[in-house]
Amino acid sequence: EAATTDRRVAERTAQLEEINEELDSFAFSVSHDLRAPIRAMQTFAEILLDDEMQTAAERNAYLVRIKTAAQGMDRLIQDLLAYSRVSRQEITLEPVRLDQVVRDAAQQLELTAGGKAYRLEIASDLPTVIGHPTVLVQVVLNLMTNGIKFVPKGVVPLLRIWTDEKQEYCRLYVEDNGIGIAPQYQERIFKIFERLHSMDSYPGTGVGLAIVRKAVHRLGGRIGLESKEGEGSRFWIELRRAE
Ligand code: ADP
């Protein structure tokens, strides 16, 4: 009995230490990621104010960089708010039709893709699962957004979406023909702020997959991926089927 209590205390202490570490690195990453665009805005604004000899084109270029930095900050804050929402919001589980979820996500993807070309293949007759409609749309949209983003230049992204049913569970797959993810990174990418590529090649906040994982866990589901570098990635989420 005493041994069990000791073990519980040790487990709890380890958990708290982990949460504490996460909080430290969270504070560090947020301040770092917000500071970079603020510095950029400061620098370019100072150049604009100090130097009166610039051409209109030069001034314009600095203004564009200020705007880009502000947009990056806004993106990060939006993503952090979405992360916090999915962590804190009350979620009542209910039967949700996956075909509706995927259709809604596809519609939003088209709006956010800004005219970028991609192909989308969605299996017919997707089942009904236990989940939450808006949370699931966000999950699928985030996976689809990554699927058309992490693709080599010149390759038209192809997204394939289908399900696989096993007894009381259903797996929804989102597969892309992108750059893929090496095995040693496949765990890490779900952590908040983890990004594998330079901002120049693939800009992002590193929050998207953390939102997805948190959301899937809050729905009582599981998430994973299969991927081969240079060939593509296949993310899956597993949820309970609705009878
Ligand atoms: P972001 O997209 O803002 O960079 P995410 O949390 O969505 O952040 O993803 C974390 C990292 O995982 C990405 O920066 C990228 O390196 C990798 N990643 C995510 N999805 C894919 C994908 N479909 N193909 C290849 N790499 C991916």
Image: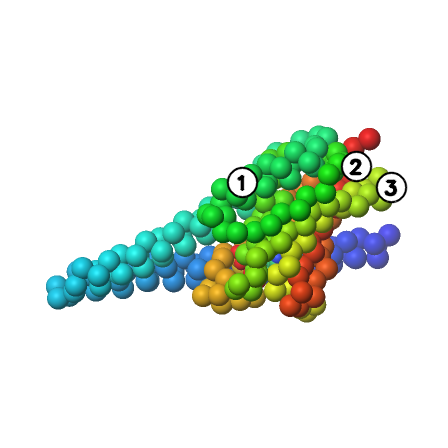
138 relative to 156, above or below: above
What amino acid is found at the position of numbered circle 1 in the picture? Gln
Q: Are marks 3 and 1 in contact (CB under 8 Å)?
A: no
Residue behind mark 3: 167
Q: Which residue is mark 1?
A: 108
User: SS at mark 3?
Assistant: loop
Asked if residue 104 shows in the view, the reply is yes
Please name the amino acid that badge 3 sits on: Gln
Depth check: 60 or 19 in front?
60
| Gap in angstroms between the C-alphas marked 3 and 2 | 8 Å
Residue 34 falls in image quadrant: bottom left
- From the image, which quarter does the C terminus lie in? top right
The image shows residue 154 at horizontal and vertical percentages of 53, 63
Query: Could you tell me the amino acid type at mark 2?
Result: Arg
Q: Residue furthest left?
A: 52
Label whose residue precedes the other's in the sequence (3 or 2): 3
Q: Earlier in the sequence, mark 2 or mark 1?
A: 1
Look at mark 2 in the image and give the residue it sits on: 241
